[in-house]
Structures are given as C-alpha cells and as structure tokens.
C-alpha cells in the first residue's frame, strides 16, 4: 500500500542546445488506493513520467516518494512497483499458469504457493479456463489479461498500466474497461494508468492528470475536467467530439454582458458570475468554448440559430455540423434528429455551460 | 464512370472466406462493408482490385467484365491498411506517383497534389519522407495517393482506423465533402460501426461464412436489424441480448428470461409476429439507450426495479450495468449522473423498441427476411 508523490520532477534528455525538456516541474500526488490516469497526446511527457516512477529512467531533478520512503534513486526492483505493458511479452512456450507464476518463481517462492497465487489471479481476471493453454492459442484480449495477471501476482504497492488497451478492438476494449474497473474495486491498489485515449482515462480513473508540452495542465475528476477545464487545451483534449471554440467580443445589451461571436450572428448569453468576472477585465477578444453535448434540441435559456451542413447519424446519437456566418461548429443531438443539409434550425444552451478563456494565455476565466 | 457489380463471388483457401457474395454499388455511391476483424473484408477488396483471383463469380465495372483482368487494367484505386508507401520518395512524390504514371504535365500534377494534401491537412509535409512522419500522416499520404488517381472505383481499406478520435471525425467530415469520392463507386471497408453508419450511403454487414448478412441504410441497419449478428455488431455498448421463453399469463404474452425472473410484456403487434417462433424460445435484443433511469425517461413506459453493478460516466453518456430480475442489463444515463455500486435504481424500458430474434437461426422475427 502506498501513496505516490512527485515533487518538482524534471526530466531533461541530452545536453546544451540539444537538450529536450521532457517533463517540467511536475507535482503530482496519487493517494493510497487511488486510480489515477496520466493522459496526454504523444510526446507530452507522460511516458517519461511513468518511466521515472517505475525507475527505468533517472530523474534529472526533484523527488519521488512511495509512502514515506524516497525512491528517487532506487533501482526498479527495489521499488515494489509492477508494470503491465501494451505489448504482451508472454513466454510462448510456457503455459498460462507458468507465465503467471514466473515472477514468483524468480523470487524463490515455493511451487505450492505459486500455484495458489496463480489460481487466485486467474480467478480475478476470469481466465481460469485457459491456465493450461499456451499464449499463441489465446486471443488478444486473453493475452492482455494474462499480461495484467503477471504484473498483479507480485502484489506490488504501486501498479502501473502503460497503454494496455491500444491494441484491442472496440468491443474488447469496452469489456476490458469494465474488468479493470472491477479489478481496482476488488484490489484497492494504487494504480496509475497511462494513455492517450481520453475515453479510457475518463472511464477508469478516480482522477485524471492531463499533460501537454512536458507540463501538467490539470488534475481532476471527470466532472471538473469537463465543466471547469483549466485552459483551452484541456477543454479541447477532453471530450469527444471536442469543444467548439469561438472568437468573440464582449458586448453590452440592456445592462447585461454577452459574447458576440466574430463574423457571425451568434451572441452567447452569460451567467451573472461570468459577467462579473469579465467586468474586471479590459480585453476586447476572448475565446468562448461550448461543448457539442451542451448544444441542445430542447429549450434552454440561451438560443442560437444555425444552418446544418452535415447530419451524421451514428446509431445512438447524431453529430450535426452546423454554421452561422464564419462560425462552424458541432452539436451532439438525439439520433432521431432529422434536420437535413442546408436546413436552418434553432438550438439551445444553458449559459452556465458557456466557457470563457483568455485569448492570449488560453486560461479559463469563467 | 461506372457502377460496380459483384456477382456470386467466391474465394477460399482451406475454407470459404468469400462465399457467393453479391452486391452493387451505383456510380457516385459510397458503399461501406463493416464487420469484425478477420471476417474477409480485405480479401473482398483485394478480389475487386485484382490482387486475388476469384474462384467463381464476376466483377463488372460498367460494361466491362474485369474479373480476369490484371490489377493495372481494372482502373480501380485502393488504399491499404499498411500504407504501402515508397520509403525513398517524399510525401509529394508518393502522392504524385499515379499522376506521373498517367503522364500528366508538371503543373497539373502540382495543382492536384496541393489540392488533395490541403484537404487531408498534410500540405506542410510534402518534402518529408514516410519515415519522418507519424502513423496518422502516413495513412493520410496513402489516402491522398489513392484520391488523386482518378479511377472508376475507389477501394478503401480501413483508411482512417489508425488515427486519433479527433482526426477521425475530421476526416469523416472530409469524406462527406469529397466530391471526387462522390463521382465514382466507392467500397469502404471498416470494423468501426460508427464510421460505417456515418459514411455509408448503404452499408453491408459482413458475417461469418463470407456473406453480407444485411445491406441497407444506416438507420435501417441500426433500427431494424434483420439478424442478431447485425444488432450485436452495431452499437456501443453492445445491445443487451436476453435469451427468453414466451409465456402467456391472463391473455398477455411475455418474453421471460431463461435465467431469472426478468420479463417483458409484448405488444399485440409484436405478439402477432411471434407465431413462427419454434418451441417458444426467442432472443430479445434491447439497446442500452432504451434502458434509462425512470427519472430521465418519458413517463408511461415500462418500469422496473434494478440495482447498479457498475457505473461509468463516458463522454456523452453514463453507462450503467445493472442487475434486474436476475439478469444483467446495460443502460444509458445522462453524463452528469453518478451512481454507486449496489445502489437501487428504477429503470424505464422503451418496450416498443425491442428487437426479437429466432433463438435457433438468429434471424429477426419482426423484419421481413
């Protein structure tokens, strides 16, 4: 059992003018038993961070603690951390049971104990029926489970999963998501899950740490990242389809501040809080964000007109590509929405969902 | 310009991969073949392209029977899932290669390549080599090379499956707008049902045994599946599949789950369709979007008590896996909801949206075959 904390952690590869700052001043706490996802696009520094936690990569500066003990300079095998990889790395000539038990064998644990633990882990992962098989006979999903099992069997204090699902096709992935969630619920182990896929991160983790450009952008639960993204990057990265952004300028009408979208008839109504936040600022341009799922067919306080360019039917839902003037954006609507190309429609939104970002720093204002 | 006709096509090695497969794609139509991995979708494209030889059947492009023609005489352009780019040529040269083969003059080539790469957002990479660009950019380069070819049919094999969700949506939108694609017959192969529903003017669902299980529009396939296989393959989370028995009580017909006490009353219209169900066994298909917390649904539907087993909030909806009447039932909620495991929940089920299938054949009892 362990809490993981990173303090001012930096990773710099290379020297002089060829140095690459891969991780910059990273502060992150993962509570004991917590499931945290490290999420970001490729090249954001998440894999370097992970490798420093495991001990596969040296820390340029800063400190890493597991519980009360500092592990910054310890070897991987001294850290009591286990890692499951994207690639399966199973021994093809060993049975599944032997594959599972192998990490214990290396540690000199007696055969009966190994057998018992392998069975326990297999039960947890629902792979008892294939214990006698060899890896080549298994499906991708089964191999992935065995690989997880081999990391689990060591009963590590910290359990790290590196992009473990990117090879799986959609249906299998979905099943794995639920399996992992159940696993964490049963084990209550500290887990760090590294991925570039926001759906996986949001579905699994108690909290999500979003990284970009070597820096931590925000740590929070799903609702926080959705409704109060720290900046335009997080608002754009989290959510599918991504947030709609508009360049807009504040205008006053009948005593209320609103956001007039550039080269468009759209004017967003704002909450009192948002108006108050704007009063203390003088900029004449802002970035306004509104999520596709917060543009509604049913009535709400705000209204906007738009013309449909594409109505994309996806079964459970439809995505409308719509425009008004030079503003082109997306709305997530029920699948029975029949609006066709070039049709003009009235849509609605709740002013509380309108996000305002500083045009220069891209940080959330309200 | 031509329509593509595939007629009784057969191809197999130790076992049939493509078996008596037939379909037609009109000139300008975007036809999507969707199915699980390994089902034979790529083989089908390779047969049309001439990279595999059909054992039986015919392939017609307009008036021409191309079944026995070599690939380069068929006038079809194909993208490969593995890209197949020339590693020593730049992105520009890779995309220009079909144009050079057709001996277009330099200005025309440049113009064409610029237009297509702008569309695919790789116009800033023209001087790089395939080894210097990302996987997604390679995929778009391969797509660009196919798009400039000016063929009589496009064959696209999973052309956007390796890209991030965000770029995938963007490229789907591009496919909707690409006029070149809308001029000739296109066959697009994917395992991703959302891609299929989004793009296909018509969609063929490929099943085991190398046949198209159902061909139709997106709405037809999703809302009126003719087979359980189609219902299961399209949709996420997967449709609830409830193996049931027909039982009658006080003149009301119910589908009652084989395991547990879960039962759904059937309407008269549904009941009329069930006369042929042998020995009273049927399979009920119930889409998760038709299982909601009662407080989110229109009043007047069928309601029942359940218990949350797992709850996950995904992007646009929450997914609840519940236990209801002794069976597992997956439903959708508003994304802002939260449920704890074990928490009781009252469900509303849109009973009129049930799909009913024959327990033996897996064919729909509601739709005409």
Image (tube, coloured by chain):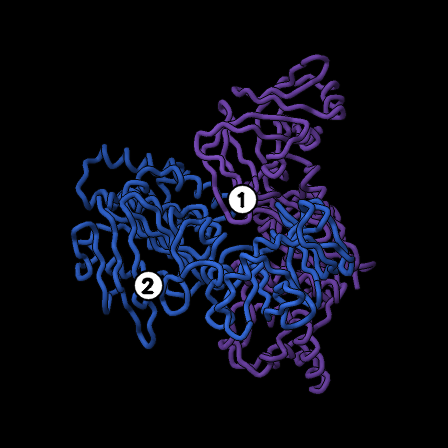
Chain colours: A purple, B blue
Q: Residue A291: give x, y in percent of width and height.
A: 61, 36
| Mark closer to the observer (1, 2) | 1
- Which chain is indicated by disc 1? A
Q: Is residue A248 left or right of residue B12?
A: right
Q: Percent from the top left, x then y, of residue B49?
A: 26, 57
From the viewer's perspective, tell me whether residue A312 is left or right of residue A253: left
Chain of the residue displaying label 2: B
Give the quadrant of the N terminus of chain B: top left
| Res A149 → quadrant | bottom right
Residue at point 60% right, 80% down?
A: A129
On the same chain, marks 1 and 2? The answer is no
Q: Secondary structure at mark 2?
A: helix
From the viewer's perspective, tell me whether residue A190 is left or right of residue A16. Answer: right
Between the residue at mark 1 and the residue at mark 2, the CA separation in whole angstroms equals 33 Å
Tell me: A133 left or right of B90: right
Quadrant (top left, top right, bottom left, bottom right) of the C terminus of chain B? bottom left
Residue drawn at (58%, 26%) of the image: A304
Q: Which mark is residue A335?
A: 1
Above or below residue A123? Residue A27 is above
Report the front residue among A152 and B254: B254
Marking on residue B43: 2
Identify which residue, B279 or A323, lies in the foreground: B279
- Badge 1 marks a residue whose secondary structure is loop
Picture residue at 75% right of the left edge, 48% below the top: A7
Q: Contact, CB < 8 Å: mark 1 with mark 2? A: no
* Residue at position x 66%, y 35% in the image: A231
């Amino acid at each position: 059992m362990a809490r993981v904390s990173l303090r001012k952690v930096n990773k710099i590869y290379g020297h002089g003018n060829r140095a690459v700052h891969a991780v910059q001043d990273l502060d992150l706490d993962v509570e004991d038993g917590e499931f945290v996802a490290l999420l970001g696009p490729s090249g954001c520094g998440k894999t370097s961070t992970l490798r420093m936690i495991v001990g596969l990569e040296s820390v340029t500066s800063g400190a890493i603690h597991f519980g009360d003990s500092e592990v910054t300079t310890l070897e991987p095998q001294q850290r009591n951390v286990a890692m499951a990889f994207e690639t399966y790395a199973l021994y093809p000539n060993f049975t599944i049971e032997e594959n599972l038990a192998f990490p214990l064998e290396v540690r000199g644990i007696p055969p009966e104990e190994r057998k018992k633990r392998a069975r326990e882990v297999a039960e947890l992962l629902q792979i008892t029926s294939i214990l006698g098989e060899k890896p080549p006979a298994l499906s991708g999903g089964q191999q992935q489970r065995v690989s997880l099992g081999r990391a689990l069997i060591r009963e590590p204090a910290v359990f790290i999963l590196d992009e473990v699902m990117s090879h799986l096709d959609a249906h299998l992935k979905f099943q794995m998501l639920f399996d992992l969630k159940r696993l964490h619920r049963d084990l209550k182990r500290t887990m760090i899950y590294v991925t570039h896929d926001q759906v996986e991160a949001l579905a699994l983790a108690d909290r999500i740490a979003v990284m970009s450009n070597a820096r931590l952008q925000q740590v929070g639960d799903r609702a926080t990242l959705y409704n109060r993204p720290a900046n335009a990057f997080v608002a754009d990265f989290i959510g599918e389809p991504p947030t709609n952004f508009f360049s807009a300028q504040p205008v006053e009408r009948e005593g209320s501040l609103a956001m007039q979208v550039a080269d468009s008839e759209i004017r967003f109504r704002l909450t009192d809080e948002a108006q108050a936040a704007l009063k203390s600022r003088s900029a004449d341009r802002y970035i306004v964000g509104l999520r596709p799922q917060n543009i509604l067919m049913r009535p709400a306080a705000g209204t906007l007109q738009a013309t449909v360019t594409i109505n994309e039917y996806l079964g459970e839902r439809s995505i409308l590509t719509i425009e008004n003037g030079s503003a082109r954006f997306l709305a997530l609507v029920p699948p029975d929405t029949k609006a066709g190309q070039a049709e003009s429609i009235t849509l609605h939104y709740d002013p509380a969902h309108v996000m305002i970002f500083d045009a220069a720093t891209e940080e959330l204002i309200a | 310009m031509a329509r593509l006709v595939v007629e009784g096509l057969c191809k197999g090695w130790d076992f049939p991969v493509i078996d008596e497969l037939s379909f037609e794609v009109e000139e300008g139509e975007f036809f999507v073949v969707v199915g699980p991995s390994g089902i034979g979708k790529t083989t089908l494209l390779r047969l049309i392209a001439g990279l595999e030889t059909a054992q039986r059947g015919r392939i017609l492009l307009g008036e021409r029977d191309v079944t026995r023609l070599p690939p380069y005489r068929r006038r079809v352009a194909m993208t490969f899932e593995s890209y197949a780019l020339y590693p020593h040529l730049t992105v520009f040269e890779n995309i220009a290669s079909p144009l050079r083969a057709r001996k277009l003059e330099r200005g025309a080539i440049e113009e064409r390549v610029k237009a297509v790469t702008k569309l695919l957002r790789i116009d800033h990479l023209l001087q790089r080599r395939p080894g210097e660009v990302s996987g997604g950019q390679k995929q778009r380069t391969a797509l660009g090379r196919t798009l400039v070819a000016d063929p009589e049919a496009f064959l696209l094999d999973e052309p956007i499956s390796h890209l991030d969700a965000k770029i995938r949506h963007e490229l789907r939108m591009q496919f909707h707008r690409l006029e070149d694609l809308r001029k000739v017959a296109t066959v697009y192969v994917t395992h991703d049902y959302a891609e299929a529903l989004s793009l296909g003017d018509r969609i063929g669902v490929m099943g085991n045994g190398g046949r198209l299980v159902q061909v139709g529009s997106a709405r037809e396939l999703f809302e009126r599946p003719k087979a359980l296989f189609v219902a299961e393959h399209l949709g996420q989370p997967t449709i609830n599949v409830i193996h049931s028995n027909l039982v009658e009580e006080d003149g009301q017909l119910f589908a009652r789950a084989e395991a547990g006490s879960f039962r759904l009353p059937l309407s008269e219209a549904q009941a009329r369709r069930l006369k042929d169900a042998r020995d009273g066994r049927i399979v009920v298909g119930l889409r998760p979007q038709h299982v909601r917390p009662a407080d989110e649904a229109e009043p007047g539907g069928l309601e029942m008590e359940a218990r949350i087993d797992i709850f996950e909030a995904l992007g646009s909806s929450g997914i609840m896996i519940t236990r209801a009447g002794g069976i597992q039932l997956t439903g959708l909620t508003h994304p802002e909801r939260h449920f704890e495991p074990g928490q009781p929940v009252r469900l509303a089920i849109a009973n009129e949206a049930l799909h009913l299938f024959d327990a033996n054949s897996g064919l729909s009892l509601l739709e005409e075959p």
